[in-house]
Image (spheres, rainbow, N blue to C red):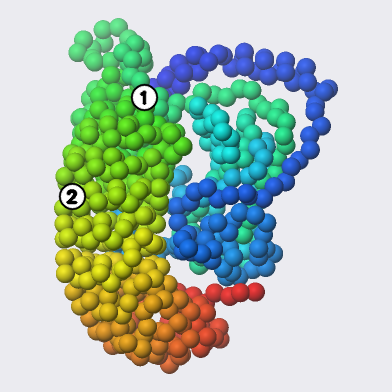
Amino acid sequence: MFPMLTLLSMFYYICLRRRSRSGTRSEALGSRRAVELGQRSALPVTVEVEQYGKEVLDFSSHYGSENSMSYTMWNLAGVPNVYPSSGDFTQTAVFRTYGGWWEQCSSSVLPFRRTPPNFHSQDFLELAFEEPVYPTAVEVLETYHPGAIVKILACSLNPFSQNPPADVRWEVLWAGKPNKALTPQARQFSPSIRQISFATNLLRLEVNCSLLEYYTELDAVILRGVRERPILALYKIPVIDINDLSDSEEEISDAGGLCCRSGGENRHNLGNGYFDRLPYELIQLIVSHLPVPDLCRLAQSCKLFHKHCCDPLQYIQLSLQPYWARLTDASLCHLQSRCTLLQRLNMSWTGNRGAVTATGFCSFMKACGVSLVCLELSCCHFLTEACLEVITQTCPCLQELNLASCDRLQPQAFNHIAKLANLRRLVLYRTKVEQSAMLSILTFCPELRHLNLGSCVMIEDYDVVASMLSTRCRSLRSLDLWRCRNLSERGLAELVSGCRLLEELDLGWCSTIQSSSGCFQHLARSLPRLRKLFLTANRTVCDSDLEELAANCSALEHLDILGTRMVSSVSLRKLLQSCPRLKLLDVSFCSQIDSRFVQEISGLFPNVSIKKSFTQ
């Protein structure tokens, strides 16, 4: 108990020092009362402005393709297309995943330690409005399986202004925990939001779909606000954030005195109270449970904790994604000396709009990349070709690289990835990687286990890529070819003949593959270890295909045959009986499978989550 009290005392002391720099609480409250007394009788009459989103500026994923509007995030701009109707509509905005199915797959990344318990976000979108206002309400029109939104933020930047501010700020308007509504029906979500000190026309919605039974669908967002600034609370307790990492000797020495005992009680006392009696390893274990900002704050409290909190062993894993709104070049510079043993780094979503530059990132990688094994960089729009070149030069041990939705990286940048000969996991979802770069990567990275090429529209011929995979990457375990529209039966046959260890294969919306060629039956016979198979929106999947899956793929856990017209209830029942590990089965829009049959087999196979979406 006593060491914990000592630790809390240190935190309280450092917070008091920070507060004293920006004035006392009594001074701030006094100025607040003066403003209230002077303006109470002359409050301005304000008119509330209501506006729908004008343009979707950025997002992490979507169900749709890059070449159409169906199920894409771009549908969120403008007035509602569907609301108040409920159901599965192509005119809505839909994220790529839902539920916990994707996290159960072997292709998913291991969670990072020290992720704050209040960080729930898995996907995001940013939506711009015409006119900056001081927000009074935000309304989200959810038309199917609502409940995914966990955070709403506002930005001080006007994305349509020619003179952006030097300091871009994000403020949280509302935050909550993941949940799911009691019904999949449409609703208008309008949480109580907090006031902010700047006008905004840029909102960010962050979502977590892990608890949902099916894809959530969003139709429109309404921003209500006033043009004139309302009276706000004038006093704020200073925030010590991730950028405030200076470790002045004066502060460390002064703070260390909090733990000192009086007099000459112990001539060998080092001034750190009971912590001087604890083994170094035990203190390391205690501070290893702190999130990064708290670790940085504690480093400023005394010399003992400065030593522990700056120990590179505390930074073997580092997830900066939860702090995307505050991370800057200065943050990376302060962390640099502590990350010399860094093995896993997550910088997804960080650094956009100039907060992190290519120069700052490259400097950090040169200092900290030598032991790096895993690097998560999804939606990092500061990345350039020079950044990828530095990664390949400074990270010889790199095994996992995620560049999902880095859609502003130029095609030639991806050529550098071929130099990472030890790569085992590569995510290029929604990037501009071209066929020549992809063939080079497959040639020089034969150890690949997991590859995601979903929505990579710049690859001209996926048959050539499939042929190279079958030749060079025979240890492949998972392959995502979501919406790869030019893969043919010939390419698929080569792929499954060469990559017989495949456990996950996503061929969703690959509409050029025809079941009549026997390619899906050949797939089932060639991949006995298959656990996940998505044949989403392939209208030609038939009973013979399901019968082969039932006969050869008993380990199957996830199967999506949404949209097929040629599968009957007989073959579906046989599949369920033959695949005891099956957990997810999507038969939405399968014309021969009606809701009554789904209800019947759901009772017979309670461990299988059978999906059958509807349109009202």
Place of residue 526 in the rendered image (x, y in percent of width and height, measured from the top left): 22, 81
Left/right placement of residue 368 relative to residue 429 reads left
Foreground residue among 318 and 76: 76
Left/right placement of residue 362 relative to residue 139 reads left
Disc 1 marks which residue?
Answer: 245
Foreground residue among 433 and 170: 433
Look at 31% across and 13% down and name the residue there: 249
Look at 42% across and 20% down and name the residue there: 14
Place of residue 84 in the rendered image (x, y in percent of width and height, measured from the top left): 69, 64
Q: Earlier in the sequence, mark 2 or mark 1?
A: 1
| Residue 77 in the image: above or below residue 130 | below
For numbered disc 1, what is the local secondary structure? loop
Image quarter in which the C terminus is found: bottom right
Place of residue 605 in the rendered image (x, y in percent of width and height, measured from the top left): 43, 81
| Amino acid type, mark 2 | Lys
Foreground residue among 564 and 387: 387
Label 1 CA crowd tier, 10 Å (few <14, some 14–19, many 20+): many
Foreground residue among 318 and 54: 54
Label 2 CA crowd tier, 10 Å (few <14, some 14–19, many 20+): some
Instruction: Kindly indicate the quadrant of the structure image that contains residue 37.
Output: top right
For numbered disc 2, what is the local secondary structure? helix
Left/right placement of residue 402 relative to residue 420 reads right
Place of residue 423 in the rendered image (x, y in percent of width and height, measured from the top left): 20, 54
Q: Do the residues labelled 2 and 1 touch (CB within 8 Å)?
A: no
Look at 53% across and 15% down and name the residue there: 22
Left/right placement of residue 565 relative to residue 281 reads right
Disc 2 marks which residue?
Answer: 419
Q: Residue furthest bottom?
A: 570
Image quarter in which the N terminus is found: top left
Q: Nearer the viewer, mark 2 or mark 1?
A: 2
| Residue 243 in the image: above or below residue 574 | above
